[in-house]
Image (cartoon, rainbow, N blue to C red):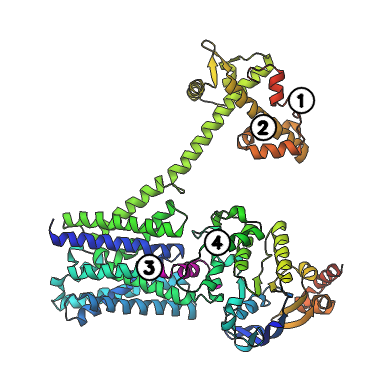
Amino acid sequence: MKVLETIDLTVSYKKVPAVWGVDFHVPQGSFVGIIGPNGSGKSTLLKACVGLLPLSSGSLNYFEGKTLKESRKRIAYLPQRESIDWDFPINVLDVVLMGCYPKLGLFRSPGRAETRLADLCLDKVGMLDFRSRQISELSGGQQQRVFLARALAQQAELYMLDEPFSAVDAKTEATILEVIADLKKQGKSIVVVHHDLFSVAKNTDLALLLNTRRVNFGPTSEMMTKENLEETYGGQLESFAHVLFESAKQ
Amino acid sequence: MSQYLIEAVISCTLLGFISGFLGNFLVVRKMALFGDMIGHAVLPGVCIGFFLSAYEKNIFFIFFGALGAAFVANALHEFLSNKLRIKPDASLAINLTGFYAIGSTMMAWLKDSGKAGQTGLDRYLLGQASSISREDLSFIAVLTLIIVASIFIFYKEIKAACFDYQFSKASGLKPQVFLIFLSSLIAANVIVSLQAVGVILACAFLVIPAATTVFYSQKLLSRLFLGALFGALAGFAGAFFSLSDANVPTGPSIILVSAFVFVLSGIFGPENGWFRKKLGTWKDKRQHQTEDFLRCAYYFYEKSHENKAQLEGVFKRSGIKNPKLFERIRKRLVRGKVIKMNGEDSVSLTDKGLTLAADMVRKHRLWELYLVQMMNFPPERVHANAERVEHLITDKILKEIEDTLSNPDVDPHGKVIPSLNDLRKHGVPGY
C-alpha cells in the first residue's frame, strides 16, 4: 500500500516555484529520504504534504484515496527545531503530551493514560529522566529527542520528519535511527528530510533526489550514481559531487 | 467610601485580573507591541461609537465601535506585513501612531461640537475610574467570565497554537482559528479597560503584570494566575489612589503600581531575580573562601605532621587579601566547630575540619593529576586551574575521576592524595 503519493506537486512562493512537478510515493513500512542542496525545496515539499503550504498545482493522495484532511490523525509531522521558541514556559512532559492532543479532540484534557503513553515515548528516546525539566534547559540534541517523543505520542502511521538530524550529537542521531528502525518493524512509514548524504545512503530504503524538480526517485542503492548526484548538487559542484559519490559508494 | 466608588474599585480590580491573565499570551508569543497597537487603534472606534450613540457614553456602541477599529487595524497590519513586506515592527508602529492620530483628530472635532466635554470623552486617553458606571461594571464582569471560561475550555488548543504553530496546523488542531479567537479576546479586554487605563497605557496593563510572572514561574498555567493576581493588585491599588486624589488619572496610577511590583519582583523574584542570583554568587564565594582556609590549614598539618598552623601562614597562603575578611572567616569556622584556636595565633582542625580539608585537598590533587594525565597539561601549570575547579567538583564527578585514573595515591607533584585510608594511617583522630 502507498501511504502517500504525490502527483505533479508544485509549490510556489510569489509565483516562483520552490518545488516543481514532483512525483514520489511512500510505500507502507518504508524509510524514505529526501535529499538535495540548500534551497532545493526539501522542507517546502514536506510542509506542502502536511498542509502547511498551499499547493499551486498537483495533488496529494494519502492511504490509497484519502485526502489530507481525512488522514491528519494518521500523520505525525515533526517541524524543524528552529521553528520553536525554546524559552516558552513549558516542560518536557507537557510537550510530549501535545502529541496526544489531536486524538483527544476538543474539550478533553490529557489524563493518566496519555501521561503513561508520553512517559513510554520519552523512555524510547532516552529522555524519561528529563520529564519535568523546562525545555529551555535542554541541549539541542535533547530538544530533538523530545520532539521525536511527541511525534511518537501521536501514534501515527506516517512520520514526516523535517531535518531531525541537523546539528545533533552522535547519541541523538543513534537514538533517532533506532526509533525509526523500531517504527519500521511495526509497519509504519517514515519520510525524512536530510542534508547528510552518507547517512541517507546508509539508512534509507528509498531516496528522492530533489533540486526544485525531481532529479530521481527510487531504491536508495540505485540512486547513488554519479550522474544523479551531479544533477542534484549542480554542475558547479561537480568535484564535490564526485567526492560524495566516491564516499557514498564505500 | 460611597457605593459608587466601591463599584469603580471593583471594576478596576476585575480589569486588572483579566488583563494580567490574558497578557501572558502576548508575552510568550513576543507580541507585546501588538497589544499596544490594539490599544491605540481603538480610539477612532471609540469616537465613532460615541458619535453613533448620539453623544451618550453608551458602552455597547463604544465597545462595538472600538472592536471594529481593532479589526480594521489588525487587517491593515496583516496586509502591510504579509503582502507589502513591511517588517512587522514597522507596520505595528505605523498602525499604532496612524490610528491614534486619526482618533485624536476625531476627538478634537467631537469636542468642538460642544457635547463631548461634559461626558468626558477625553477620559479615554488616560483613564478615569470614576467614569465607570454600574452598567460598565456588569459588562466587565460578564466579559471576565467569558474570557476565563473560554481560555480554560480551549486551553490545550491555545497552548499548542502559541507554542508550535506548524505542529498544531499539521495535526489539524486549527491554530489559525484559536489565535484569531485569542486576539479577539485581547481586543475586547483592551476596549473594556480603556475607561480605567486609557488608550495610551492600555498595553502596559496587559504586559507589565504578565511580564512580572517571569520572575516567579516557568509554568504557563501558574503564570496566568500570577499575572491575574498582579493585575488585580495593580487595578485595586491604582484605582484607590486615583480616586482618593482626583488630580491623578487612573491609568498612570495603575501602571505605576504594576511597574513597582515588577521592579520588586525583578529584584526579589525566585526565578532569575537579581537578589537570588547575587545571593547564589555570595554563597559560592563564601563557601570557596572557607574551603581555601581549610586547605591551607591542612597544608601546614601535612608539612609538620602536627595538627597546628600559624594563622599568619594560613593567611598568606590562602590568597585572601583582606585581613578583616580573613578574621571573619576564622570566626565563622570557630563557631562552626571546624577549627579550634590554640591561643591567639595558632589554629588546629577539628575532626570535622580535617575531613572537610582532606576532601578539598583530594579534589585539588586529583584534578591536577587528571589535567596532566588525561589532558597532557605540564605539571607546573595545573595548580592555578585546580585552585578554581576544586570547588566545583561534585561527588559524582569525583567518582568519575577516581575511576578514570583508577584511584591514584600521588599527585603530579609527588604529594600524597589524602584518602580515608591515609587519614587513618597518619593517625588522624576519628578514622
What mark, if any, has residue A115 been given in the picture?
Answer: 4
Whichever of labels 2 and 3 marks the residue nearer the N terminus, that label is: 3
Q: Which secondary structure type mostly characterizes the magenta part of the structure?
A: helix
Residue numbers of the magenta segment? B150-166
| Labelled disc at residue A181 | none
Measured in 3D between alpha carbons, the distance from the residue under mark 4 to the one under mark 1, in whole angstroms, is 56 Å
Rendered image: mark on residue B414 = 1
* B169 left or right of A208 in image: left
Tell me whether marks 2 and 1 sit on the same chain.
yes
Pointer 2 local density, CA inside 10 Å: few below 14, some 14–19, many at least 20: many
| x, y percent for residue B322 | 51, 25
Please tell me which residue lies in front, A143 or B37: A143
Mark 2 → mark 3, Cα distance in angstroms: 54 Å
Task: Identify the chain of the residue marked 2, using the numbered disc in the image.
Answer: B
Which residue lies under the disc numbered 3? B35
In the picture of the structure, the residue carrying the numbered disc 2 is B363
The CA distance from mark 3 to mark 1 is 68 Å
> How many tags in the picture?
4
Q: Is residue B324 left or right of residue B294?
A: left
